[in-house]
Amino acid sequence: MESNKLKSLIIIGILFCYAGIAKAQFPAKYWVKFTDKNASPYSISNPSAFLSARSIARRANQSIAVDVTDIPVNQTYINQVNATGAQVFQRSKWINAAIVIINNTTQLNAVNSLTCVSSSSPVAKTHKMTDDAISVYDNSTPSAAKTTAYNYGPSLTQNSQIGADCMHSLGYRGQTMVIAIIDAGFYQANINQVFDSLRNEGRILGTRDFVAGNSSVYEDDSHGANVLSCISGNSPGNLIGTGPKASMWLLRSEDVGSEKLIEENNWVVAAEFADSVGADIVNTSLGYNTFDNASTNHVYADLNGKTSVASIAATMATRKGMFMVHAAGNEGAASWQYINIPSDADSICTVGAVNGSGVHSSFSSIGPTSDGRIKPDISAMGEGAFVCLPGYNFAGGNGTSYASPILAGAVACLWQAHPNKTNMQILQAIKATATKSVTPDNQYGWGIPDMCAAHNYLMITTVQEENKNSNVKVFPNPAKEQISFLLNEQATSIVLTDVLGQDVSFGLNETENHQYTLQLDHRMSNGIYFLTIKTSLGISKTKFIKE
């Protein structure tokens, strides 16, 4: 097979004020921070003025309060900056800052003299990391068939390795979930056949280009489209994404054709936008770490989750209730070797790459963070991952850029099954049931996940929590063949129902001390069942899990 290079979306860059700039060159983009949000027309008591209903609901579902970081940047301050002749290009409410185009020293001095401005720093140039590799797929030999929810074709391995196919078989395919992809462009995703169902079902909720300042993303780089295919691809016999029924926001923050990149700040703005429109999950196959100017390179000590603006924002995004999925990076075999920014952020899910056999890929960036935290968090198939390129061409790809969306789509299925869980509870379940949950390390993290095992873990914890207040204790729970419980008096009625409310037959044994044992029918499917017990004292209800 002929090998082609794909522009990597593990691209490096960071915005901060650095010493040693001999002479500012204009026009230039600056990161301008403001002092406060005083006299804002917005109030946290009326969040619907600046957050979507879905975004507010996500917070409410996870008991997250709307706070001052959600308040937009003060428009009065924006007007003052624009009055200097400079131009505000993008704004960040979480950081309380703006990307400003400044044309000369006079404008820069005028901006810095504003009482509402606390600091300004120029945008640094960035350096590209190792490319993701793409090999054109030869589909002349069909893959072995397997009885599953979909005809996965060559994408079966990346689905089955993490249990995504199991979740699909249970009916969880990402319905009701919203994923935002922040990337470099989605070339021809509006016409590629692999996304026909995504478009026809109206599940592309919108697009935004934070580089050009518009909503056009289909003429730019193709990497985001390749990433999208790992989640939303639907071509039976060729490629089925891990979250094939999820709805999507397509957000461009990366300009791969420019030497003056401001990706980190663009990413912050894009993440804020994803939050405001109500995304549940954000996938980022981007990364930042070094500059063209060696004196401004990001150093390992900065990988603490608190130094870079993107890492700060990534942590903020998790605090807003989103599940953040980030590619670890492709520098494992290079001199840098470590994860990139914002993969060092706290509470996000950083994804490393393995091959189809579950072996760590040598190119996959490793941890730990500089403050000693294990990274990556989870591993998924990023070596030989199956993707769809523009032109409806299928290929095998190498890169954590693909491991990340493969996991993100599966997370959508898991969270769909447990909509009342928080993002951190979902992450905990994934880690607790992954292959290295007991012995995590800085290559695999907590290992390769099993989404159906995580699903069962969450069902068990949910049932245990809900049964705490029940006066009937069922054991064992989960159960395989039988359950038992003890009553203070004889039961007058025992009813067993499934999640649809339909009665389920069972065998019953009772001892003299009112201990009951229910023999479960071997034909019962796995899942949650409800037990209703009536005595002269009243009615008791409890749940158990059949496994």
Image: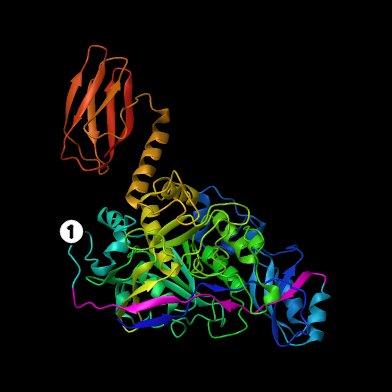
Q: Quadrant of the N terminus?
A: bottom left
Q: Residue 399, position in %: x, y? A: 43, 70
In screen coordinates, is 3 left or right of 482?
right
Q: Which quarter of the rendering shows the C terminus?
A: top left
Q: Amino acid at mark 1?
A: Thr
Res 242 quadrant in image: bottom left
Secondary element at tag 1: loop
Q: Residue at x 34, y 47 (%)?
A: 453
In front here: 69 or 290? 290
Vertical placement of 505 versus 539: above or below? Answer: below
Farthest top residue in view? 512
Q: Is residue 491 visible?
A: no
Identify the magenta region: 115-141
- How many discs mark residues in the rendered view? 1
> Where 499 falls versus 174 (above or below)?
above
In the picture, measured across the screen, residue 304 lies left or right of residue 243, that is: right
Residue under label 1? 147
Residue 385 visible here: yes
Residue at the location (33% across, 26% down)?
Answer: 540
Residue 75 screen position, x and y as percent:
70, 72
**Residue 472 % position (x, y):** 34, 24
Q: Position of residue 261 (x, y in %)?
A: 60, 80
Q: Is residue 458 magenta?
A: no
Residue that appears at 18% across and 74% down: 141
- Residue 475 lies, with reference to residue 444, above or below; the image says above
According to the image, what is the colour scheme of the structure? rainbow
Mark 1, other Cα within 10 Å: few <14 / some 14–19 / many ≥20: few
Q: Nearer the viewer, residue 50 or 271?
A: 271
Vertical placement of residue 486 versus 382, above or below: above
In screen coordinates, is 198 left or right of 492? right
